[in-house]
Image: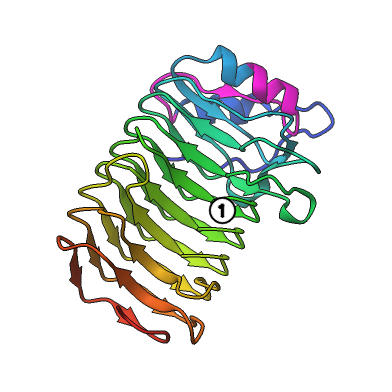
């Protein structure tokens, strides 16, 4: 049974002993707990932790470089109160996964788009079996959530992604990606985009997502599949509030399977 963290001592930058004990009881091994709001401690514990869970308590962490978890590690926040934010002028991604079996969940990533200009990404993976779960990601100057060539078995589930300069969620050369149950809105280009780029994008599932007011660029789409991506299943998605010059679902693939989607506005292609 998961136990809720009800309070912590902000003055001491630590959780009460009773809460720490209760929290650790929910993990196979004791969780590593970051000092609340301390970005230096966050970075040190991410570097030092080689297995298990790292809890990032509620607070704001201004990232001075990318956070790069080791293989087998879970980064776990406390929902939208755990804020990882890029500072003004940042030229780096927020969380970068290059190793296997990393999970990032229950965190809030703020790309500070108004004060950056380089093309930074929020959640970024080239690893195997990465999971991005229940994250709120917004205002990145590149992609909010992205898998690049080399990523396989990537799961993006239960996330809210909005106000990216480019795509809300992109699988670029990802093998066996799953994009399930996300809310994707107000992004500058396609809401969800699957394509090959320099890799091979195949065997992905896009299911149960709600995509709205994305595809703001001419010819973009709420969900787009092209550039040779193969064996993509698109099912049970809701697409709404697109622009007159955009598409609900745009597919340029001979092996896509499109089933029972609802387009409230825009058009299917």
Question: What residue range appears in magenta?
Answer: 26-44
Q: In terms of image quadrants, where is residue 99?
A: top left
Q: In which quarter of the image is residue 125?
A: top left
- Does any portion of residue 76 appear in the rendered image? yes
Quarter of the rendering occupied by the C terminus: bottom left
Q: Front-most of 129 and 5?
A: 129
Residue visible at 34% across and 52% down in the picture:
195
Q: Quadrant of the N terminus?
A: top left
Quadrant housing residue 37: top right
Q: Mark 1 points at which residue?
A: 136
Q: Front-most of 169 and 135?
A: 169
Left-right relation of 46 to 158: right
Residue 50 location (% of width, % of height): 47, 14
Position of residue 172 measured from the top left corner of the image (x, y, whole percent): 38, 46
Q: Residue at image x 16%, y 63%?
A: 254
| Frontmost residue, 14 versus 93 | 93
| Residue displayed at 44% across by 46% down | 133
In the rendered structure, the answer to whether residue 233 lies left or right of residue 49 reads: left
Total labels drawn: 1
**In the image, residue 92 above or below residue 80:** above
- Residue 191 is situated, as x and y percent measured from the top left of the image, at 46, 64
SS at circle 1: strand
Question: Which residue occupies the extreme right position in the image?
Answer: 11
Give the answer, above or below, for where 236 lies relative to 86: below
User: Image point 71% across, 54% down: which residue?
Assistant: 113
**Residue 3 visible:** no
Q: Which of 225 and 6 is in front in this view?
A: 225
Place of residue 74 in the rendered image (x, y in percent of width and height, measured from the top left): 46, 29
């Amino acid at each position: 049974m998961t136990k809720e963290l009800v309070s912590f001592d902000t003055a001491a930058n630590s959780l009460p002993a009773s809460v720490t004990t209760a929290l650790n009881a929910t993990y196979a091994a004791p969780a590593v707990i970051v000092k609340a709001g301390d970005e230096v401690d966050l970075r040190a514990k991410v570097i030092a932790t080689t297995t298990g869970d790292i809890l990032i308590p509620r607070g704001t962490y201004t990232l001075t470089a990318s956070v790069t978890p080791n293989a087998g590690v879970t980064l776990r926040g406390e929902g939208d109160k755990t804020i990882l934010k890029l500072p003004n002028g940042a030229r780096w991604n927020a969380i970068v996964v290059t190793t296997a079996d990393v999970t990032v969940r229950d965190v809030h990533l703020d790309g500070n788009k108004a004060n950056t200009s380089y093309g930074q990404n929020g959640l970024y993976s080239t690893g195997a079996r990465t999971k991005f779960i229940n994250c709120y990601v917004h205002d990145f100057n590149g992609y909010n959530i992205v898998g690049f060539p080399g990523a396989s078995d990537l799961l993006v589930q239960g996330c809210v992604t909005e106000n990216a300069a480019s795509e809300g969620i992109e699988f670029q050369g990802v093998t066996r990606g799953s994009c399930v149950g996300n809310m994707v809105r107000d992004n500058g280009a396609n809401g969800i985009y699957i394509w090959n780029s320099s890799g091979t994008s195949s065997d992905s599932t896009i299911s149960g997502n709600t995509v709205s007011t994305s595809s703001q660029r001419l010819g973009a789409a709420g969900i787009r599949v092209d550039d040779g991506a193969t064996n993509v299943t698109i099912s049970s998605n809701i697409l709404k509030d697109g622009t007159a010059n955009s598409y609900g679902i745009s597919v340029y693939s001979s092996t896509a399977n499109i089933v029972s989607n609802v387009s409230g506005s825009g058009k299917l292609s």
